Image (tube, rainbow, N blue to C red):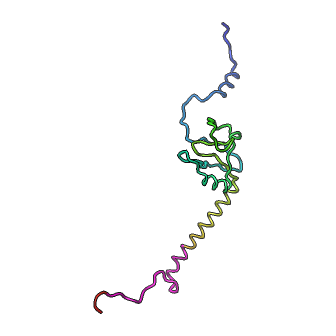
C-alpha cells in the first residue's frame, strides 16, 4: 500500500474548506450579508399559519421589498414549496426584506418632526398655566347647596 504524502499547501487548502469543528448555537433567524445602501428587516407575513395581508401591504407600501434568496447564498433554506413569493427568504412566517437606506432616513426625519410637534404642543399647553388669559382650570363662581336655603 502506497502512503500518500501531502504537502503543507494541500493541508492548508483543505483546512480552509472544512467546516468548523466546534458546535455553535443556531439563531432563530439567519444574519444576511449586508448590501451597501440597504437596510434589512424581517416582515411578518403570517401568524399561527394565517396570512397577514395588512402587515405585508403596509410594509411594501413603505418601500420594503423582498430579499431574493439567489442574492444571499449564505442563507440555507429548506424549500417546502409553500413560499408566498418566489425566490424569497421566508422563515416561520417572516419574510426577509430590504429598503434603501435613504428611505429609512426620510422615515426617521418624518417621525422626528411629528415628535417635535407633539412636544411643542405639550409644552405650550403647560406654559399657558402662567398666563391669566389662558388658565388651565376655570374657577366657577356658582355654588351648590343641599337642603334648606
Residue in view at x 52 percent, y 86 percent = 133
Which quadrant of the figure contains the N terminus?
Answer: top right
Q: Which residues are magenta?
A: 122-145
| Rendered location of residue 2, percent (x, y) | 67, 8
Tell me which corner region of the image, top left, top right, bottom left or bottom right, holds residue 109: bottom right
Residue in view at x 54 percent, y 34 percent = 24
**Extreme-top residue of the structure:** 1
> Front-most of 26 and 65?
65
| Rendered location of residue 25, percent (x, y) | 53, 36
Labels in figure, total = 0
Query: Can you say whether 106 is above or below 125 in the image?
Result: above
Query: Can you say whether 127 is above or below 108 in the image?
Result: below
Which quadrant of the figure contains the C terminus?
Answer: bottom left
| Rendered location of residue 130, percent (x, y) | 50, 82
Residue in view at x 68 percent, y 60 percent = 106
> Front-most of 7 and 52?
52
Query: Can you say whether 120 is above or below 100 in the image?
Result: below
**Extreme-left residue of the structure:** 148
Tell me which corner region of the image, top left, top right, bottom left or bottom right, holds residue 107: bottom right
> Front-most of 64 and 8?
64
| Rendered location of residue 22, percent (x, y) | 55, 30
Magenta span has 72?
A: no
Q: What's the magenta bit mostly, secondary-structure-wise?
A: loop
Amino acid at each position: 500500500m502506497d502512503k500518500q504524502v501531502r504537502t503543507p499547501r494541500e493541508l492548508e487548502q483543505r483546512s480552509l474548506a472544512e467546516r468548523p469543528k466546534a458546535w455553535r448555537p443556531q439563531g432563530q433567524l439567519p444574519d444576511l450579508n449586508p448590501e451597501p445602501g440597504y437596510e434589512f428587516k424581517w416582515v411578518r407575513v403570517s401568524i399561527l399559519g394565517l396570512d397577514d395581508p395588512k402587515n405585508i401591504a403596509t410594509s411594501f407600501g413603505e418601500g420594503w421589498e423582498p430579499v431574493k434568496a439567489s442574492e444571499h447564498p449564505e442563507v440555507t433554506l429548506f424549500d417546502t414549496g409553500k413560499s408566498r413569493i418566489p425566490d424569497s427568504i421566508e422563515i416561520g412566517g417572516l419574510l426577509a426584506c430590504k429598503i434603501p437606506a435613504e428611505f429609512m432616513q426620510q422615515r426617521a426625519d418624518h417621525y422626528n418632526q411629528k415628535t417635535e410637534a407633539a412636544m411643542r404642543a405639550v409644552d405650550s399647553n403647560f406654559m399657558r398655566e402662567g398666563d391669566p388669559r389662558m388658565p388651565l382650570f376655570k374657577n366657577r363662581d356658582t355654588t351648590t347647596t343641599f337642603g334648606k336655603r
